[in-house]
Image (cartoon, helix red, strand yellow):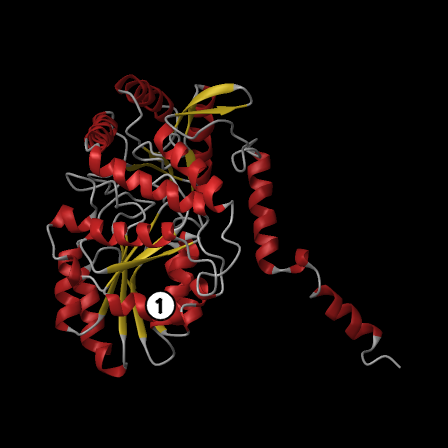
Amino acid sequence: MAINSNKDDKKLQAFSKIETLPSYIKLHRALAMLHRVGADDIYFMVTKGISTNKIIIEDKEYINYCGYNYIGMSGDPRVTKATIKAVEEYGSSVSASRIVSGEKPLHRELELTIAKLLGVENSLVFSAGHATNVSVITSIVGPDDLVIHDALIHNSLWQGTLFSRAKHVLFPHNDYEALERILKKKRNDYERVLILTEGVFSMDGDISDVPKLIALKKKYFAFLMVDEAHSMGVIGKHGLGIREYFDINPADVDIWMGTLSKSFGSCGGYIAGTHNLIRYLKYTCGGFMFSAGMSPANAAAALEAIHLLEDEPQRIERLQQRSQQLLSTLKQIGANTLTSENTPIIPVMVRTELNAIRLSHELFKRGILAAPIFFPGVKKGTARVRFFVTCLHTEEEIKYTCEVIKEILSTLKV
């Protein structure tokens, strides 16, 4: 005997298919819009070779502004050599969680090197950057706590906040007066308060005023976590990130987070701070405890990249010069680069999704790869094409890029 009537069965059946999910329906409509404007291929393009200042697509070479190989570590022969050596010695996988038998000498050497680089006591490396944020936030705060975050934080920080079940409040982007108003009003209602920000924001290319955040976190007895995915190896005279850029005491930030996939030519994430923080996470953080340890290849690549960063500061100098060249030239031609300053992330605001797609496509026709960014990646009405600059880009490539952008923008209604 059936538990449900035929009518009930049909109703329930509608909820048992992926294509009935509201989020799937929204996605389908968005992809249909891309199809209508002839932009089906802007995502998941197959590329060949190493992602540097150049990239190969269907056997044609493009100037590449879609990769964050900021200081050219991915593809450096010394990084490649270190990677091969690690695989030959330890295999392609550690084949276990580090808490059991997956701990290798490379892990500890990398963690101590990262800690020294940041000027803190210890660090812990994870297999993926996104999972680092999600799992660490859920280990630090819970239902009795409050997370206050910048409105433009990365998806990984946002998901970690949601999964933690902590209450959460956002403050307008880089508005520290608004943050203090929230702290004044709500601090005494919660046990722990965690303030989240990014060192360099990945969509706008601007820098968080971390000294102001440090002052507020001290005044209101909060934790401060700074995501340095796009600032470590990028800003500061020697590429040492936020702490060098602002000349701050690294101990004043409770939780330093970073990734290894940008400046360090590898893959993974890290958390850095006190010995007590790292010991706590090793035994409580699900994303670390119940995941295979970082692969030998990734650990070795990141370790060698850090050594090269220390030995070859000219990489940082070139990166910063090329970034400034692109930013200043774009401003000269009247492009709206929002609040980007002193970073290699430079958006060109064109407001509508259609304009972003058109600009990206016209650039592609002229041998330039740059990604259109629009809702839900950014707020509606703030669509842009984003440019990642690397130390490998040449002055000539950037000059040509700006000439093409100027020509295309003259045809768009922005």
Direction from residue 147 to residue 180 in the image, left or right? left
Residue 355 location, x and y as percent?
A: 43, 34
Residue 45 location, x and y as percent?
A: 54, 33
Please name the amino acid that badge 1 sits on: Leu
User: Measuring 78% from the left and 68% from the top, which residue is drawn there?
Assistant: 10
Read off the residue under disc 1.
Answer: 281
Residue in the foreground of this view, choosing between 8 and 112: 112
Residue 227 location, x and y as percent?
A: 29, 54
Q: Quadrant of the N terminus?
A: bottom right
Residue furthest right in the image = 1
Residue 205: quadrant of the picture: top left
Direction from residue 341 to residue 369 in the image, left or right? right
Direction from residue 132 to residue 208 in the image, left or right? left
Residue in the foreground of this view, choosing between 287 and 83: 83
Answer yes or no: is residue 329 visible: yes
Query: In the structure shown, which secondary structural element does the residue marked by tag 1 occupy?
Result: helix
Up the image or down, 102 lies above or below 190; here it is above
Q: Quadrant of the C terminus?
A: top left
Up the image or down, 291 lies above or below 330; here it is below
